[in-house]
Image (spheres, grey):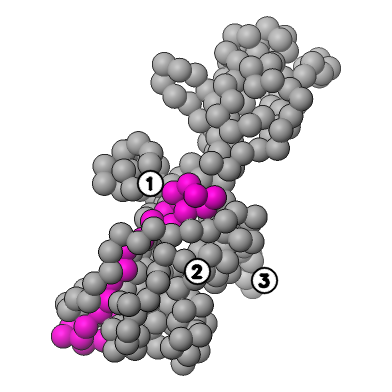
Amino acid sequence: MASRPSSSREPGDLAPVVEMPPTGAKGARLQEIFEAWVAELPTGSPIPSERDLAEHFGVARMTVRLQLDRLAQRGLLYRHRGRGTFVAERRVAHTEHLTSFTEDMRARGLEPGSRLLGIEEIRAGAQLAARLEISASSRVIRIRRVRTADAEPMAAEQTHVPARRFPGLLDQDLDHGSLYDLFEHRYAVRVAEADQRVTVTDLTADEAALLETEAGRPAFRIERTTRDADGTVVEFASSVYRGDRYEVLMHAKRDPGRH
């Protein structure tokens, strides 16, 4: 599991004593204090009780609860009923740039990995044929993998590619390296663009078991249709990412003609 840098402060210690504003901006100031404090603590560190924090900073318990709730909503903390509040694991950000999982993890200083669950050749059928823009009778290779970051499960992934375009793929080593690198260097197929759909879901029991977490936990479901420079579909992939380890970032610009 990825951990935060070590700190001289013990996990159970209260946040540092600082001067609070007399009125008005206590909530905002407390948020700044908590955010800086949590960033120094190792993953899984327990957070003191709301009552202890309220007494420590001389604020209302409701003020503390509100700021802790906001940190939890941002994924910096998580709550476990009956046990308390804890520092969440650092999240990996997914951006609008088209990268492979391997490239994405390495760019964030994490070691990517894969565990192959299965690979098989199947008939496309109507639904997959529509996704891959091929005939329903065409053959498709389905690859199922658990993707890891620093040896911890990050996503459960299912990828479909046209079998005709990737002969011999069933015999390749898919436990190591990037699938996109394999496409490019062995098959001269270079991905150029992709359409992605991101939705929020709850992990099923089977997905949770693969990702080594609890069923019902929030997750991102990402569907991606990838094309080459000619616009031909290369793959259709569906992945489920752990919501406590992943986040989606987007850059948007407003049309200057809108008012």
Task: Please tell me which residue lies in front, 2 or 32.
Answer: 2
Residue where numbered disc 2 is placed = 177
Mark 1, Cα crowd under 10 Å, few <14 / some 14-19 / many 20+, is: many
- Image depth: mark 3 or mark 2 in front: 2
Tell me which residue sits at (41%, 21%) in the image.
81
Is 134 colored magenta in this rendering? yes
Q: Position of residue 3 (x, y in %)?
A: 61, 39
Q: Secondary structure at mark 3?
A: loop
| Residue 157 at least partly seen | yes
Type of secondary structure dominating the magenta stretch: strand
Residue at the right extreme, as displayed: 19
Q: Secondary structure at mark 2?
A: loop
Task: Please tell me which residue lies in front, 121 or 248.
Answer: 121
Looking at marks 3 and 2 on the same chain, the residue that comes earlier in the sequence is marked by: 2
Tell me which residue sits at (45%, 73%) in the image.
179
Looking at marks 2 and 1 on the same chain, the residue that comes earlier in the sequence is marked by: 2
Residue where numbered disc 1 is placed = 211
Mark 3, Cα crowd under 10 Å, few <14 / some 14-19 / many 20+, is: few
Q: Is residue 22 above or below residue 183?
A: above
Residue at the bottom extreme, as displayed: 230
Q: Position of residue 123 (x, y in %)?
A: 17, 79
- Which segment is the magenta one? 132-155
| Residue 199 at least partly seen | no
Residue where numbered disc 3 is placed = 256
Q: Disc 3 to disc 2, how far (Cα)?
A: 42 Å
Q: Secondary structure at mark 1?
A: helix
Tell me which residue sits at (45%, 82%) in the image.
183
